[in-house]
């Protein structure tokens, strides 16, 4: 079997790994890849030190956000979100926990705030986050959710941006040495 890869926003995607259970076709009209009826909308590599959670005594960077309108994704659309790869959460541990928040705006407040995303929109699921490693400050917000190997979700009313981040209690020591931690976003095409 020929191994194909695709690079989107720095993330190397093995088409073998994402199609081992699926049916891959190429839409002749616009060359989009279609897997089990979903089109690849985009993919990203994520910074292992980035977050939208509160931090304390931690030199983290602000989380990446994606404007869903760039992929023609609107509220009510069905998305399939897949995490790929893993990051080093310390010198001796690895993790692949990935969390996200839909927002009406791309604004993010400073890292000492608990509710850093003023436009955050709740979804039916929640991911409970633990206190900061330094100072044991609460970080949990209602609007976040976890992206696992395959997570289906509907874009909520007002959702224009998707903030994405690795989950950790201390970000400054994080690395992704082989730069493979990220997300692939698929959307169900309009019928
Ligand atoms: Ca990695
Ligand atoms: Ca860490
Ligand atoms: Ca939460």
Image: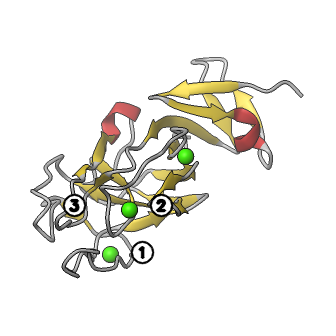
Q: Quadrant of the C terminus?
A: top right
What residue sits right under mark 2 in the picture?
Answer: 153
Q: Residue at (70%, 43%) from the top-left corner?
A: 18
Q: Residue at (35%, 45%) from the top-left corner?
A: 74
Secondary structure found at label 1: loop
Query: Could you tell me if the residues under marks 1 and 2 are in contact, i.e. CB atoms within 8 Å?
Result: yes
What residue sits right under mark 1 in the picture?
Answer: 125
Q: Residue at (16%, 49%) from the top-left corner?
A: 105
Q: Of callouts 3 and 2, which one flags the residue occurring earlier in the amino acid sequence?
A: 3
Between the residue at mark 3 and the residue at mark 2, the CA separation in whole angstroms equals: 31 Å
Residue 55 spot, x, y in % from top left: 20, 65
Q: Nearer the viewer, mark 1 or mark 3?
A: 3
What residue sits right under mark 3 in the picture?
Answer: 58
Between the residue at mark 1 and the residue at mark 2, the CA separation in whole angstroms equals: 9 Å
Secondary structure found at label 2: strand
Query: Based on the displayed image, in which of its 4 quarters is residue 137 positioned?
Result: bottom left
């Amino acid at each position: 079997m020929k191994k194909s890869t695709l690079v989107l926003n720095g993330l190397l995607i093995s088409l073998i790994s994402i199609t081992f259970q699926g049916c891959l076709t190429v839409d002749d009209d616009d060359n989009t890849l279609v897997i089990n009826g979903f089109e690849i909308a985009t993919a990203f590599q994520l910074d292992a030190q980035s977050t939208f959670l509160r931090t304390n005594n931690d030199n983290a960077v602000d989380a990446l956000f994606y404007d869903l309108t760039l992929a023609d994704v609107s509220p009510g659309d069905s998305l399939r979100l897949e995490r790929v790869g893993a990051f080093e959460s310390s010198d001796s541990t690895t993790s692949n926990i990935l969390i996200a928040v839909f927002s009406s705006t791309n604004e993010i407040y400073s890292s000492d705030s608990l509710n850093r995303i003023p436009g955050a929109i709740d979804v039916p699921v929640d991911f409970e986050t633990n206190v900061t490693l330094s100072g044991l400050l609460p970080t949990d917000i209602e609007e976040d959710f976890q992206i696992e190997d395959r997570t289906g979700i509907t874009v909520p009313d007002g959702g224009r941006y998707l903030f994405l981040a690795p989950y950790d209690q201390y970000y400054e020591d994080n690395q992704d040495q082989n730069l493979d931690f990220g997300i692939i976003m698929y959307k169900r095409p309009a019928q």
